[in-house]
Amino acid sequence: MLTPRQAQFAFVPLMVTVMSGVISLAMTVLHAGPGPGLLQAWLANWALAFVIALPVAWVTVPAVRTLLSRLTSQPPAARELGDMG
């Protein structure tokens, strides 16, 4: 089992692997079409997409988290029985 900290570190590479694979497959099929050589072209494109996407994700994910935490308001505290107001 992973600790919460390990899971945080594993999230970005795992997400980048899945997303770069799906997007590179879609773009390869769109540009080359299904047919002979598709698998080799996709794997080459996937490798390139992953090499580009991983460092971009490592930089942008913390920045996006920081931005979202600044834009997120905390819900008001639940009122207790007997609170006035």
Image (cartoon, rainbow, N blue to C red):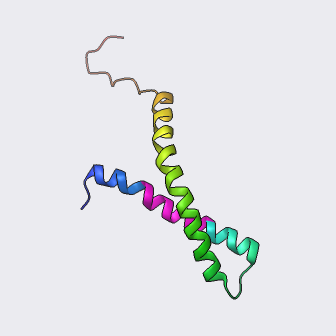
Residue 51: horizontal and vertical position, in percent?
Answer: 53, 61
Residue range in magenta is 12-23
Q: Residue at x 35, y 50 (%)?
A: 8
Residue 79: horizontal and vertical position, in percent?
Answer: 32, 21
Left or right: 84 in relation to 60: left
Left or right: 75 in relation to 20: left
Q: Main secondary structure of the magenta part?
A: helix
Residue 70 position (above or below residue 4) = above
In the picture as drawn, the residue positioned furthest to the bottom comes out as 36
The quarter holding residue 83 reads: top left
Q: Nearer the viewer, residue 69 or 62?
A: 62
Report the label total.
0
| Residue 15 in magenta stretch | yes
Residue 73 position (above or below residue 18) = above
Q: Nearer the viewer, residue 34 or 77?
A: 34
Can you say which quadrant of the picture contains the C terminus?
top left
Can you say which quadrant of the picture contains the N terminus?
bottom left
Q: Residue at x 58, y 76 (%)?
A: 43
Residue 15 position (above or below residue 36) = above
| Residue 78 in magenta stretch | no
Q: Residue at x 37, y 57 (%)?
A: 10
Residue 58: horizontal and vertical position, in percent?
Answer: 46, 49
